[in-house]
Image (cartoon, rainbow, N blue to C red):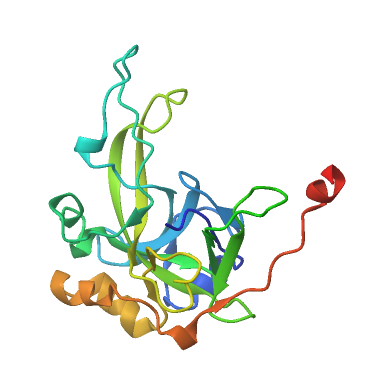
Amino acid sequence: MCNLFRITMGVEAMRDLFKGIGNRTNRNEFDDNIYPDYPAPIARKDADGEMELAMLRWGMPTPAEHLKPNAKTGVTVDSGVTNVRKSWIPHWQTWMGEENRCVVPVTQFSEYGSVRDPVTNKLPLYWFALNEEKPLFWFAGVWTKWSGVRKAKEGPVDTEIFAFLTTRPNAVVEPIHSKAMPVILRTPEDIDIWLNAPRKEALRLQKPLPDDELIVLPPEPPKLEELILE
């Protein structure tokens, strides 16, 4: 599952696709690396049906059967679900209507390999993009308002959260991660279908990106702190 992605383009690049889109983020740039429960920009329709950018926390509600209260405190902590694969089950069908769909801007996403490095014993991290120039694309996502405890130290919160859909991997992702890949939207037409079409039609987009439209990026050089440790 994808639990790390990057956005290396600012608000204006995102707004180019949606003419006149509003901006509720109050920010022009974002952290490059997005991890679970981090705030990230998403594009969605507001109450009037107009497009807007907003900052939401990454991770939708966990199915109730997978949650249980802490034995000592009695508090149920829900750290969230980042990826939605089984969109047909009742839990996820709750948010598959037009009012809860969104798109998530991305320039790269990552998956861990399955073979550990013999020296570090760490799993290698691979990055995927449309091409080496790393242009902007979009994940098909869902969002909701939520009240609960995401972190025990944080306590109860009222917030807005999101996740994106996944599907079976294409031939580029499968050798590295054989279970799934994000649902990627590349064209304004696909984005329009995802945001506005009836549920059945929109969910036809839950399929792998064609093999020739995705690449594995060259390995990144070690970070300075890693070189110092060596």
Above or below: residue 220 compared with residue 190: above
Q: Residue 44: percent from the left, percent from the top?
A: 34, 63
Q: Residue 209: percent from the left, percent from the top?
A: 39, 79
Q: Residue furthest front?
A: 118
- Taking depth in this image into account, of 112 and 18 the one nearest to the observer is 112
Residue 187 position by quadrant: bottom left
Residue 170 position by quadrant: bottom left
Q: Residue 5: percent from the left, percent from the top?
A: 53, 60
Asked if residue 153 lies left or right of residue 9, the reply is: left
Residue 61 position by quadrant: top left
Q: How many marks?
A: 0
Which residue: 58% across, 82% down? 131
Asked if residue 16 lies left or right of residue 198, the reply is: right
Above or below: residue 206 compared with residue 6: below
Q: Residue furthest top?
A: 72
Asked if residue 29 lies left or right of residue 155, the reply is: right
Quadrant position of the N terminus in the picture = bottom left
- Taking depth in this image into account, of 75 and 125 the one nearest to the observer is 125
Q: Residue 198: percent from the left, percent from the top?
A: 15, 73
